[in-house]
Amino acid sequence: MKPDIKICGLKTPETIERAVARGASHIGFIFFEQSPRYIEPADAAEAVAAVRGKVKIVAVVVDPTNDDLDEIVSLLKPDLIQLHGNETPDRVLEVKMLYGLPVMKVFSVRDADDLRRIDSYIGIADRFLFDAKAPKGSELPGGNGVSFDWTLMKQLDENVNYMLSGGLNKDNVAAALATTRARGLDVSSGVEEAPGVKNIDMIDGFFDAVAKASHLSAASGS
């Protein structure tokens, strides 16, 4: 089964349109000012105008205030909010109630204990995203280009709906899928020529690698 694919940290119409043309299910926009992928909400809204309705638009935020979300939601009109901070289950539920939108909650993973943190969010978050913990010294909660031990995913209940993130690229995505059977993939730095600068050829390469891996998986019956 072909996984959902989210290209995150997009900023230009050209890369957005290429991601959608290649079959992205989600496109993500970063509203965290310390990130090289940061984009103003008004600019993001303008950039997605040509693809709205063809792909799910994701607003990626880190411990946002309601004022932050009011601006982002009113301008971008996202299909999904991705919470990438220390939001509690109560806060996730509050965001869902306030904006009437599904929420994907991100968890940073290094060991099995990190996965157990999702228990109190099950039934509240609509989907999970598992990313690697940031390297020491990084100010970014995600997009650091590092992976974690994917075999940890085998400990999850198979009914947990999640996207896999952290250091994915065209060279390792087949192994990631074979190891985790993730229903969704989230890539950012793996399709960049420099931090925050997406590369169309690298986007193509990633989608080609996923298609090849999915074809081989289907052929083997796994």
Image (cartoon, grey):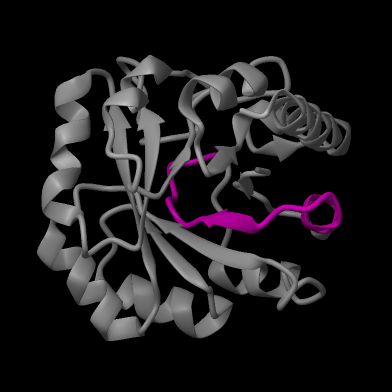
Specify whether 137 is left or right of 1: left
Q: Quadrant of residue 49?
A: bottom right
Q: Looking at the image, which is closer to me, 124 or 60?
A: 124
The picture places residue 183, in percent across and down from the top left corner, at: 52, 44
The picture places residue 198, in percent across and down from the top left corner, at: 74, 38
Q: Is residue 25 magenta?
A: yes
| Quadrant in which the C terminus is drawn | top right
| Quadrant in which the N terminus is drawn | top right
The picture places residue 135, in percent across and down from the top left corner, at: 35, 17
Examine the rendering and report whether any part of residue 84 can be seen.
Answer: yes
Q: Quadrant of residue 124?
A: bottom left
Range covered by the magenta-colored residues: 15-36
Q: Looking at the image, which is closer to me, 13 or 42?
A: 13
Q: Residue at x 54, y 50 (%)?
A: 38
Q: Residue at x 54, y 80 (%)?
A: 77
Examine the rendering and report whether any part of residue 140 can be seen.
Answer: no
Q: Residue at x 26, y 56 (%)?
A: 63
Specify whether 36 is left or right of 173: left
Q: Residue furthest front?
A: 221
Specify whether 113 is left or right of 191: left
The vertical placement of 208 against 122, above or below, is above
Tag count? 0
The vertical placement of 39 against 181, above or below, is below
Q: Quadrant of residue 195?
A: top right
Q: Looking at the image, which is closer to me, 31 or 163?
A: 163
Q: Residue at x 43, y 35 (%)?
A: 142
The picture places residue 191, in percent across and down from the top left corner, at: 71, 31
Q: Is residue 166 magenta?
A: no
